[in-house]
Image (cartoon, rainbow, N blue to C red):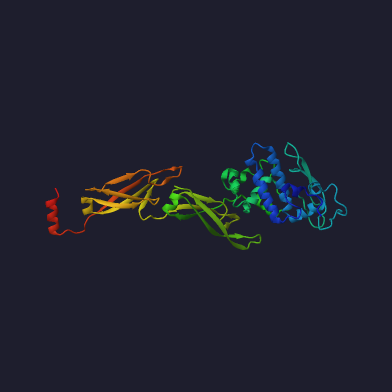
Amino acid sequence: MVKETKLYDTLGIPPDASPDDIRKAYRKGALKYHPDKNKDNPAAAEKFKDISQAYEILSDPEKRKIYDQYGLEFLLRGGTAPPPNAGGGGMPGGFPGFGRAETYPGFGGGGGGGGGPRFTFTTSGGGPGGGFGFMPGNPENIFANFAKMGGFEGEEDFSGIFGGGSPLGGGARFGSRFGGTRTSAGSTNGARQAQQPQREATVVEKPIAFTLEELFNGAKKKFKVKRKTFDRDGRIQREDKEIEIQVKPGMKAGSKFKFAGIGDEIDGTKQDIHFIVTEKPHPVFVRQGDDLIATISLPLKEALTGWSRKIQTIDGKTLEVSHSGPTPPNWSETYPGLGMVKPKDPSQRGNMIVKVDIVFPSYLSPEQKQKLKEILP
C-alpha cells in the first residue's frame, strides 16, 4: 500500500499504474498544459510543472519505490529527518544514508505565484550504497527528452509546440522559463543528454504517385513504413508504422505531407519523412496548373478537310470536338470549367484545352505531288 497518491492523482492514474500508463498520462497532460500552448494561462504552467515532476519520479523505478514507501515530502525534503531505522548508513531496501542538505529552486507542490516554493534536497554523506541526491529536472528538459525518445509520435497537437518545428531543434530555449537547467543527479542518461547539443532530425523525401483522377476527386491512401529503431540495450528493432495520406481535390504535384519521427533512428533521433505528391502519366491529359490539355493527332488529310473526335473529360463526361477545316498547326479550342478542381476553391475549375498535332506523310509519290500542286492554291 502506498503512503500517498498525490503524484498519481496529478497524472490521473491509479497507484498500480504500469510504466506505459505513466508515459501515456504524461504525454496527454504535457501536451494539454505546455506553456507554449497556454501563453495567457499561468495556471497551465504550474500544472505543467506538477505533471513533469510526477512523471520524473514515477517513471524512475527507484524514485517511485521511495515515494510509495515514504511519500513526496520525504523524497523532496528528505535529509532533515530520515524515516525510522534509516540511520546514517542506509535504510531498509537499500536507500542510501543522508548527509548535507542543499537548497534549490523547486517546482510542484501546488505553490502559488513566484514560481513555487524552494525545496531542500540532500546529498549522500558517503554512506553505503552511494548517494541518491534527487533534485527535480527542468520541466522543458523533461519534455524535450520525452520527445527525443519518440514519446509524441503521431500527435497532431505536438505540431503546435515550438512553432511547428522539431522539438530537438529548440534546445536553446529549454531551461529559461522555469529558472534552471538541473537534471536529476540519479539519472546519468538525463545528465548526458543535457550536456550534449541536441541533434536535428534528418529528413528523407519519398515520392508517392497519384492518378490525375485521384488528384481531381481527392483520395486517401494507407500504407506502412518499415523503420529501424533501437531498444534501451542498443539492440536493433524493426517495426512497421502505419501512415495515412489524404489528398484534397485539386492538389498539385510537388505538395508535401510531412511526418515527424517516423523514419529510421539515427544518432538518437528518428528521421522525419516528407512524402512528395507525384502525378502518374495520363493517356489523354497533361496538367498545366488548373488547366487540362488534350492533344489530338490529326492526319494531314483531315486537317485540310475537317475532322471530329469524342473526348472523355476528367470527370467522365463525353465531349465532341470538331473543326470543319482547314485546321492550322497552332489551332486550339478552350472549354471553360472542364479542367481540374481549384484547390483553394473546390467549387471552381480550370479549363480544358484541346490542341492538334498534324501528322504529315513521310512520303509522296510524284503523281501525288502533282495532284496537290493542282489542287492547292
Q: Please give left or right for residue 12 compared with residue 334 in the image.
A: right
Please name the residue shown 40% across and 47% down the image. 340
Quarter of the image with the N terminus is bottom right
Q: Please give left or right for residue 196 compared with residue 304 in the image.
A: right
Question: Percent position (x, y) of residue 155?
Answer: 60, 50
Residue 20 vs residue 372, the one in the foreground: 372
Question: Percent position (x, y) of residue 179?
Answer: 69, 41
Residue 40: quarter of image:
top right
Residue 29 vs residue 342, the one in the foreground: 342
Q: Please give left or right for residue 74 compared with residue 161 in the image.
A: right
Please name the residue shown 36% across and 44% down the image. 351
Residue 236 vs residue 8, the one in the foreground: 8
- How many marks overall? 0
Q: Is residue 263 visible?
A: no
Question: Percent position (x, y) of residue 30?
Answer: 66, 46
Please name the residue shown 67% across and 37% down the image. 41
Q: Is residue 321 visible?
A: yes
Residue 317 vs residue 149, the one in the foreground: 317
Looking at the picture, does residue 237 appear above or below residue 43? below
